[in-house]
């Protein structure tokens, strides 16, 4: 199995706090689903943000697809992996749902017919077609979550990081999300899932890593 995200002796701490990670060594593989579990404050979300290049270690390095994350532009990193926040409203800034899906491709100068065909397919897959002309701020939390995942998939990424993807979703929406993740996995997309939801983790994870106080206390294949 090929590593996709590698932590090489990573130290990280926030200003005026103790180290969250010290000499963290971890390889997360491509084309499989890895779940990170642990209590609040254990470092789960910090680890995901280091993996996505939103935070940088004080020591060591994070390597994504063979390249030091510090050497990569956010644009280049965005072609390799997508990140869906737990506080999902932070990453939605289109004027409409459809605009949220299409504006990055339009900026890149990608053929409009191709962009809109892909966007319409994702709108249908995520049950957002009837909301296409709504402003993202007017959507429910679950709708915003589905939109954020759909937007990440507009780029042909090979890896997706999901922070607490099932929070505030009802059972039907969780089932819909699960079906989507199953489809992504079948298409070779690797995933890192940060989650408290044991049933969701059990359904999707090939590998489950539990962290406590910035250290790995369990790492096993499911």
Image (spheres, grey):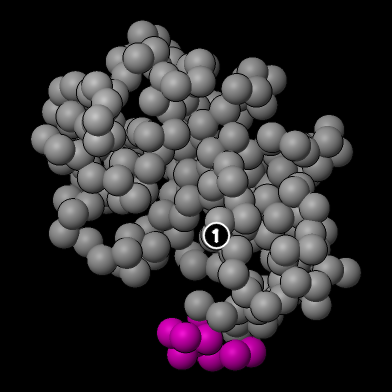
> 134 or 119, which lies in front?
134
Residue furthest top as drawn? 217
| Disc 1 residue crowd, few under 14, some 14–19, many 20+, Cα 10 Å | some
**Which residue shows up at 63% across the image and 43% down it?**
181
Task: Provide the residue span drawn in magenta.
Answer: 105-113
| Residue pointed to by mark 1 | 91
Whether residue 82 appears in this view of the structure is: yes
Residue 4, picture quadrant: top left
Q: Give how far across and how far down residue 143 sits, in percent.
A: 76, 54
Residue at the spot 79% in from the left edge and 59% down from the top edge: 139
Against 170, residue 161 (above or below) is below
Q: State whether residue 94 is above or below residue 211.
A: below
Compared to residue 4, the image places residue 138 above or below, namely below
Report the residue at 60% width, 22% height from top: 196
Q: Residue furthest left?
A: 59
The reply, left or right, for residue 143 in relation to residue 22 is right
Locate residue 195: give its quadrant.
Answer: top right
């Amino acid at each position: 199995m090929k590593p996709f995200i590698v932590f090489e002796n990573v130290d990280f701490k926030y200003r005026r706090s103790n180290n969250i990670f010290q000499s963290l060594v971890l390889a997360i593989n491509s084309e499989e689903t890895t779940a990170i579990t642990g209590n609040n404050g254990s470092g789960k979300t910090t680890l995901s943000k280091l993996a996505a290049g939103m935070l940088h270690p004080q020591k060591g390095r994070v390597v994504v697809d063979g390249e030091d994350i510090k050497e990569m532009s956010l644009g280049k990193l965005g072609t390799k992996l997508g990140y869906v926040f737990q506080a999902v409203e932070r990453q939605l800034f289109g004027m409409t749902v459809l605009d949220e899906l299409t504006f990055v491709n339009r900026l890149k100068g990608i053929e409009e017919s191709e962009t809109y065909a892909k966007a319409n397919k994702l709108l249908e897959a995520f049950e957002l077609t009837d909301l296409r002309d709504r402003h993202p701020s007017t959507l429910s939390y679950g709708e915003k979550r589905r939109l954020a995942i759909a937007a990440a998939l507009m780029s042909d990424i090979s890896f997706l990081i999901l922070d607490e993807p099932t929070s505030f979703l009802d059972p039907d929406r969780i089932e819909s999300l699960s079906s989507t993740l199953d489809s992504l996995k079948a298409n070779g997309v690797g995933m890192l899932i940060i989650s408290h939801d044991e049933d969701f983790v059990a359904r999707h994870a090939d590998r489950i890593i539990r962290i406590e106080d910035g250290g790995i206390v369990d790492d096993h294949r499911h």
